[in-house]
Image (cartoon, grey):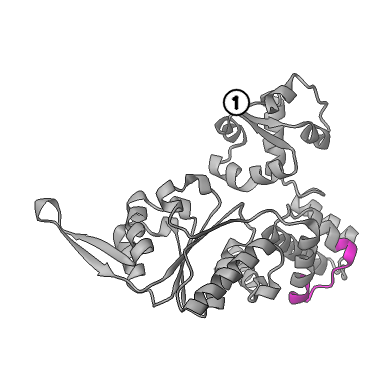
Amino acid sequence: MSSGDVLKKDDVTLDLALRPSRWDEYIGQEKIKNNLRILIEAAQKRGEPIEHVLLYGPAGLGKTTLAHLVGREMGTTMKVTSGPAIEKAGDLAAILTNMEEGGVLFIDEAHRIHKVVEEMLYPAMESSTLDIILGKGPSAKTIQLHLPRFTIIAATTRAGLLSSPFRSRFGATHRLDFYREEEIERIIRRSAALLKARVNDDAVKTIARASRFTPRVANRILKRVRDYAQVHNMTPVTRAVAQKALAVLEVDAIGLETTDVRILEAIITKYGGGPVGLKSVAASTSEEVETIEDVYEPYLLQIGFLSRSPKGRIATKHAYEHLGIPYHDKDKQGLLL
């Protein structure tokens, strides 16, 4: 096993250790937590599984954690899979026929479920039945299996790619929003305590500002800052230490990474600030369209560095100012309307 594999394994272990295991440990997303609590309590009083739940929003905001908390609160078994992992109808049949009464099936990356598999889910979600076709052609037969009552919790970063029939079968749909800076600071303090890392308040604020309003990013940066401080014997972690660690990570004060800068510079220098299509931006930066759309664009839109128009993406005046590039209006304001 390489040292890189060891680090990845250690990071996965740490991520699981930092994941909240109770409602009171989960910071932020208060409206969604309250709605889910009502959903769970009402279902428990009726002695039924909760309705199917769809969670969507940018990556790293806690969709998986919420799903696990719901399963724990229901006191039931939970199976975990992902859209790409269910390749064939037989894969889905194997999963669903092994569900327990009242169990929870968590499907990550739900927008990547194959169309045939998705259509098999419809009767399973509506009436707990599964139609299996045996054979081909005129001699084919359909067998209907009755399944235990169960709940599907689906998570996706791209709800727009889910078909309308699929979305309509979820009884509760919730969008996770970016966190407030003070919430990220609370998450960092909790994680630092679990990691037994001494981090000063000013360092917590520095890490929080660079965390893209995202818990997963906050925990990742915290772990790397802790590593930097330990290697250089700089404990407790101060603002200066955090800033040095961020510089090594090539993350600036507001959380922009090298790829963020490359995206903005490509739009500004190669396409005059836009508007430009996402495929052109991807080609210019050697990044996948999906990666830009799922990982980088949500934060750039959130902080007002990027805007969408009917003609494509536009770098805003704030992006020019942050990169130190002279801004020329060129009637861009009209394109944003």
Q: Does residue 2 appear anywhere in the picture?
A: no
Count all numbered tags in the image, as a single digit. 1
| SS for dot 1 | loop
Find residue 253 and report its horizontal and vertical position in percent: 82, 49
**Label 1: how many residues lie within 10 Å, few (<14), some (14-19) or many (20+)?**
few
Range covered by the magenta-colored residues = 192-203
Q: Amino acid at mark 1?
A: Lys
Toward the viewer: 55 or 196?
A: 55
Q: Is residue 115 above or below residue 92?
A: above
Residue for point 56% across, 77% down? 73
Q: Which residue is mark 1?
A: 311
Toward the viewer: 146 or 79?
A: 146
Find residue 147 and report its horizontal and vertical position in percent: 32, 71
Q: Is residue 132 above or below residue 113?
A: below
Residue for point 34% across, 65% down? 127
Asked whether, in this view, residue 75 is left or right of residue 300, the answer is left
